[in-house]
């Protein structure tokens, strides 16, 4: 049993696909299978169940995955810290987050950080949900994740940074555009553009609708908040989205964003494996982003409600 065996096994558990891991590692599916077979031979028990759509860990596989994922993450993180010590200020900071996060939350911070640390490499890995960010952090090799905060996750520490109220995005000529706020009654006949599948923001919104007894009609679903805003501005539907400063002003002349005060606010911020284990460079980038958000978002710096 080798570290590479365990790394491949953890990657397969994360993706649910031998072929996907083979593509990720630039090797053959047979080579991936050999790693799994070696682990199963040495442990004496089946670790994966094969299904038509992929593989899932057996109970024994889940036990090994839980132990291996955290340990490998710690080892990989320590190796990166050692490389950073060797290179000094020429190290790297690796962040996983959604496709539009840098534009809305980090653009000014990236410029400021690069000005302060010109030799440091900033690397971003795009994912489609907070859950994917958590998996990437636990797998190791990444420093920070910018997420929509949700339920606690074992092995992950979450830090709130920005509080976001919800708004209804509509075209300027929509009958709802003249309203100063959106109430529950206004949503009864609204056709909504669905937020990204598996996103925390969507699950929060769906839970609120269910608790309120509202069943909005959804014509389509999009991959990110920006696409929902674009479709709403074009008059192709309505979108309930978190309110972001980048959507206000002359860049969106035909868009109206109307507050939905009955919706509980959404929090976004950092997720890490352990704050005290962060490299000085990663901590510096996290602090730079928080300071930048504090200037742009008026609610920054407040304490997350319990």
Image: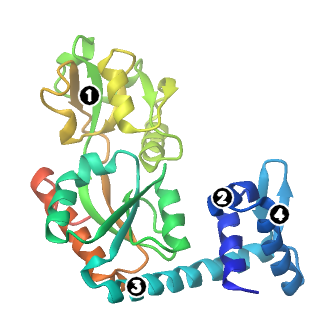
The residue under label 1 is 182
- 35 lies above or below 252: below
Q: Quadrant of the N terminus?
A: bottom right
The residue under label 3 is 83
Q: Earlier in the sequence, mark 4 or mark 3?
A: 4
Other-residue count near label 1 (Cα within 10 Å), few / some / many at <14 / 14–19 / ≥20: some
Residue 246, image quadrant: top left
Which element type, helix, strand or loop, lies under badge 2?
helix
Q: Earlier in the sequence, mark 4 or mark 1?
A: 4
Q: Nearer the viewer, mark 2 or mark 1?
A: 2
Image coordinates for residue 88, horizontal then vertical, percent:
28, 85
Q: Nearer the viewer, mark 1 or mark 3?
A: 3
User: How many dots with numbers?
Assistant: 4
Q: Is residue 257 left or right of residue 129?
A: left
Report the disc number at residue 15.
2
Q: Earlier in the sequence, mark 4 or mark 2?
A: 2
- At x 24%, y 40%, the residue is 243
Q: Earlier in the sequence, mark 2 or mark 3?
A: 2
Is disc 2 in contact with disc 3, using a CB cutoff of under 8 Å?
no
Is disc 2 in contact with disc 1, using a CB cutoff of under 8 Å?
no
């Amino acid at each position: 049993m080798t570290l590479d065996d365990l790394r491949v096994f953890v990657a397969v558990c994360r993706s649910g696909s031998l072929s996907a891991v083979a593509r990720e590692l630039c090797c053959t599916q047979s080579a991936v299978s050999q790693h799994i077979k070696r682990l199963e031979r040495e442990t004496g028990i089946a670790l994966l169940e094969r299904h038509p759509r992929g593989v899932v860990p057996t109970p024994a596989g889940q036990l090994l995955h839980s132990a291996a994922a955290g340990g490998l993450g710690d080892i990989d993180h320590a190796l990166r810290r050692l490389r950073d010590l060797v290179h000094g200020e020429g190290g790297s900071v690796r962040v996983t987050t959604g496709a539009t996060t840098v534009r809305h939350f980090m653009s000014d911070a990236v410029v400021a950080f690069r000005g302060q640390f010109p030799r440091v490499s900033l690397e971003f890995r795009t994912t489609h949900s907070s859950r994917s960010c958590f998996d990437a952090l636990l797998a190791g090799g990444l420093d920070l994740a910018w997420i929509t905060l949700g339920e606690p996750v074992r092995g992950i520490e979450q830090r709130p940074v920005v509080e976001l109220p919800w708004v209804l995005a509509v075209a300027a000529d929509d009958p709802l555009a003249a309203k100063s706020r959106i109430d529950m009654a206004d949503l009864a006949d609204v056709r909504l553009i669905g937020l990204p599948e598996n996103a925390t923001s969507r699950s929060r919104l769906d839970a609120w609708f269910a608790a309120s007894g509202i069943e909005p009609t959804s014509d389509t679903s999009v991959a990110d908040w920006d696409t929902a805003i674009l479709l709403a501005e074009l008059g192709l539907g309505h979108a309930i989205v978190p309110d972001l400063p980048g959507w206000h002003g002359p860049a969106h002349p035909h868009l109206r964003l109307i507050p939905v005060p009955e919706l509980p606010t959404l929090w976004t911020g950092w997720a890490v494996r352990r704050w005290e284990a962060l490299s000085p460079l990663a901590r510096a980038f996290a602090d730079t982003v928080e300071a930048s958000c504090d200037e742009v978002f008026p609610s920054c710096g407040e304490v997350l409600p319990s």
